[in-house]
DNA sequence: ACAAAAGTGTTTCGGCTACACCCATGC
DNA sequence: GCATGGGTGTAGCCGAAACACTTTTGT
């Protein structure tokens, strides 16, 4: 095979996306019911081939858009999986990404029409191939990121309360953060702005809504949370 | 092209290695004088094609072995670089790795015979393609790793003094760590064992040698150093 | 009245920082 | 004696953790 002026054997390259959403105090993963052999009918990460004229990032964006209808998802490379035997159907090199998606904004019908389904992270079916390992690495990477910067912009609705973002962190780390301390820490980095509206659906008293600032002040590298 | 039962267009896949060594209180990078067009004669990371029957890790190990004669190098994936135009010679997807190498143990003649050369990180020539970006990401990743666990096993000689490992950290973070505090912190995690021998070549008084323990006690996630 | 979250304040504790200080030795 | 790194000790500061306490309001 010839590509440009190089002459060497080539590989099938795919991307697999760990698509995460957040709903009802739980992290959820979008899985795809595989339609082809091998492992037909098994639950798979959402993936696709990398086309000749696109980067792996472009491929990941194309695939996440196609299944969710959302253009604005946060994408990050996780790892390359390339053991020759990882896919029984052939030698495929796969680049794993995680994707963070505002679950309330995506197109649920589109997801369903593709045979995909959201699963709570605590109630996952068995995944095909090495997809469980991909998921594990993605979660590790997400936790690391969330410990250095406040995430949620891509997972929460536009407006949210401090309770909601704390519950998001609870879900990510599978632990309970102290309400008072979490609040003070998060507000101290000044990346959120307080709105005038309140959310009264989750507490008697009602909590102020916040949103992420458009431009973030650069904030210190000091760990946001420990885990 | 057909690979197994899948039918899709394929890609050239390469690996590029940011090979780092440590010598004379400086981090050094092994670069390769490129022998083919495009960018013939330019300085390049050490790389190679991924063969049909090997993982990207295997390819990286093969390539680092071939140029250094060392089998025991520490390898870690950094990132996939896949912009369609990144290599003017053709569409090549490259997986960047960093490699840590005990510079005192490697085969200097082998390196020379391949037209490769060690450069101090402060005196680098211009690199071809996106290799400078690869290097930057590798160093960021190395700093992150070094902040969570004590590195040096793959960079320092078997025996070393606390001065030497501190200077390694100075080189990695480009700052001066406090001798007393660094010492206490490093020893507190109990991954080093004190030897009976002393190194008298670097100080009047002579400093005890240490080495990494064979089995490491699991130590806390608390940052080792801040930067 | 009670429950439950909102929001603020306070105390304690551990670890990091910034040093001071003595030791050993070659020059 | 002096400079240099080896090695130990310590006072102070800062931030995290734990938790008390008051507010608000629907039931």
Image (cartoon, coloured by chain):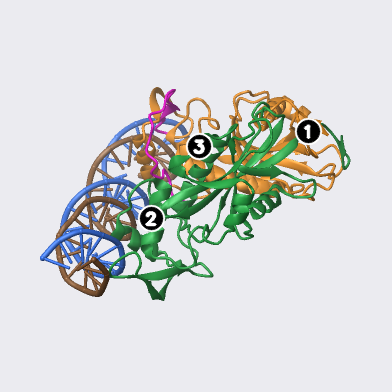
Chain colours: A orange, B green, C brown, D blue
> Residue A42 shows which numbered tag?
none
**Residue A180 visible:** yes
Q: Which residue is depicted at the point 50% across and 25% down?
A: A158
Question: Which mark lies nearer to you, 2 or 1?
Answer: 2
Left or right of A110: which side holds B144? left
Respond whether the residues carrying marks 2 and 1 are from the same subunit.
no
Respond whether the residues carrying marks 1 and 3 are from the same subunit.
no
Near mark 1 (Cα within 10 A), the count class, few <14, some 14-19 or many ≥20, is some
Does the magenta portion include A226? yes
Question: Which type of secondary structure does the marked residue at label 1 adopt?
Answer: loop
Residue at the spot of label 2: B167
List x then y, in percent, for residue A223.
41, 45
Question: Which quadrant is home to the N terminus of chain B?
Answer: top right
Q: Which residues are magenta?
A: A204-227
Q: To which quarter of the image does residue C22 belong? A: bottom left
List x then y, in percent, for residue A135.
65, 45
Residue at the spot of label 1: A115
List x then y, in percent, for residue A147.
46, 44
Output the chain of dot 1: A
Residue at the spot of label 3: B125
- Badge 3 or badge 2: first in the primary sequence: 3
Q: Is residue B60 above or below residue D26?
A: below
Q: CA distance from mark 2 to mark 1?
A: 56 Å
Question: Which type of secondary structure does the marked residue at label 3 adopt?
Answer: loop
Q: Which residue is depicted at the point 51% across and 67% down?
A: B216
């Amino acid at each position: 095979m010839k590509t440009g002026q190089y002459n060497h054997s080539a590989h099938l390259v795919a991307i697999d996306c760990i698509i995460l959403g957040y709903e009802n105090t739980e992290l959820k993963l979008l899985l795809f019911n595989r339609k082809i052999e091998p492992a037909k009918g098994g639950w798979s990460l959402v993936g696709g081939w990398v086309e000749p004229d696109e980067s792996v990032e472009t491929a990941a964006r194309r695939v996440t858009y196609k299944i969710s209808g959302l253009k604005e998802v946060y994408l990050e490379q996780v790892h390359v999986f390339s053991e020759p035997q990882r896919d029984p159907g052939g030698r495929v090199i796969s680049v794993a990404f995680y994707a963070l998606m505002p679950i309330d904004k995506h197109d649920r019908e589109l997801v369903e029409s593709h045979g995909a389904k959201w699963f709570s992270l605590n109630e996952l079916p068995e995944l095909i191939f090495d997809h469980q390992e991909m998921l594990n690495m993605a979660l590790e990477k997400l936790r690391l990121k969330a410990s250095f910067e406040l995430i949620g912009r891509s997972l929460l609705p536009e407006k949210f309360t401090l309770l909601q973002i704390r519950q998001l962190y609870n879900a990510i780390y599978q632990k309970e953060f102290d309400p008072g301390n979490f609040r003070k820490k998060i507000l101290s980095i000044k990346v959120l702005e307080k709105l005038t509206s309140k959310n009264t659906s989750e507490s008697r008293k009602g909590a102020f809504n916040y949103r992420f600032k458009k431009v973030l002040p650069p904030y210190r590298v000091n760990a946001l949370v420990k885990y």
